[in-house]
Image: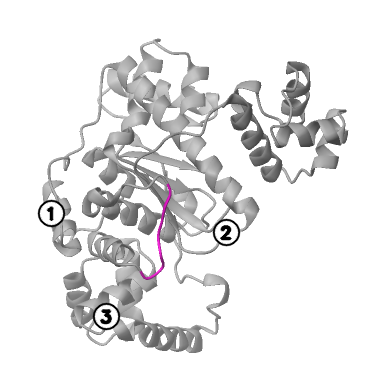
Amino acid sequence: MEQSVLSENIRRYMKLGNWTIPSLAQAAEISATTLSNCLNDKSDPRISIIQKIADKLNVSMSQLFSEKPSFENFRFRSLYALTAKERAFREDLLYSTYDKIQEYLKIERFAEKGNVFLFSNEKFDNPIEAAHVVRERLGFSQSAPILDICELVSKIGVKFFHFDFKYSKTYGASVAANDGGPAIILNSSIESVERKIFTIAHELGHILLHKDTFKSSETMEEKNSTEEGEANLFAGELLCPQEIVYEKVKETHGFSFIDAVLKIKQIYKVSYGTVLHQYCNRYGISEQYSAVTKKFQAMYANKNNVSFKNHFEPYALSETLYRFEDPFFRDIVVTLCRTEKISSAKAAELLNWKRVSLEKWCEKMDESSENSLPF
């Protein structure tokens, strides 16, 4: 079993690092035959040889002997065919997610503080109703914009992770409660802030709507699947309710349709595409979304002399204005650091912050607790 795990891990890290058998063998100063035998389980390599391989792959020995995490309920959000290297990155995502969840649970136990999932005993069938219930349960009116999707997710009791998947075809993933979640994992390599926000809401939709279908360890979403459509409906309604689009368009007396859409987009922190989707859904013309989008793009491009190539987003949100992090985890780590239960170096590592930034944050918190003004 160990030998099989070893060979599988070596193959995975070779794909991730663009190594071939000849190139890795030469770099590790072993024969290509020795490496080939190891990869095909034809020999039991000495520890010294495995160490040489690990060094060149830039991984630890323990990583080479780590068994693939056994998730019962892991959902990838990937809509496109993957290359062999991308499949290796996707598999690596399993290891990274498992490690992150175990780290999170360990900190919760150490701090003796856990985040409770609010909807553990509820089952939703209708995505629109589910979005309304979430808003109501968390104290949002049906017209209020959600300014911090990560805070909303945290208040529901869902863990959140944000790291680079190393490839762009998978926007996000989610893990059900019985695998240490519920948890949402967001690909930090996504360039669009609007896409990131929508992906978080989309994965939350899967967690709430599709609890019973979190069965396969590597569930792949089909682009036009029913569950994908339901998760998209939930995300759109949660972030930018259809009735708001209807009312806001009516209120823009004297404004063009373009201006109305862009005004809604800026208020609700979504893409123009989300607004157009909600507009089409409200008027029962969802099948005409593509035509409406093309018309909007043509009108905007003509007015502003721009092109919508390369996924152009009018009034795009700035990455610098958002912190894609889990506020519950951040707060308990900072508290542990301030009470000297963990070092600032360890806290910075857990939060993926610079140590100096964490120490300044803690200083400001200490000062604000002593004064009436937090600055």
Disc 1 marks which residue? 133
Label 2 near label 1: C-beta < 8 Å?
no
Label 2 near label 3: C-beta < 8 Å?
no
User: Vertical placement of 4 versus 235: above or below?
Assistant: above
Was residue 221 drawn as part of the magenta stretch in this picture? yes
Which portion, as a residue range, is magenta?
A: 218-224
Q: Residue at x 54, y 51 (%)?
A: 189
The amino acid pointed to by label 3 is Cys
User: Vertical placement of 284 versus 121: above or below?
Assistant: below
Disc 2 marks which residue? 82
The amino acid pointed to by label 1 is Val
Decide which of tag 3 and tag 2 comes sooner along the chain.
2
Quadrant including the N terminus:
top right
Pinpoint residue 295: horizontal percent, then vertical percent.
41, 89
Decide which of tag 1 and tag 3 comes sooner along the chain.
1
Quadrant including the C terminus:
top left
Q: Is residue 49 visible?
A: yes
The amino acid pointed to by label 2 is Leu
User: Vertical placement of 142 versus 122: above or below?
Assistant: below
SS state under label 2: loop
Q: Is residue 375 visible?
A: no
Q: CA distance from mark 1 to mark 2?
A: 36 Å
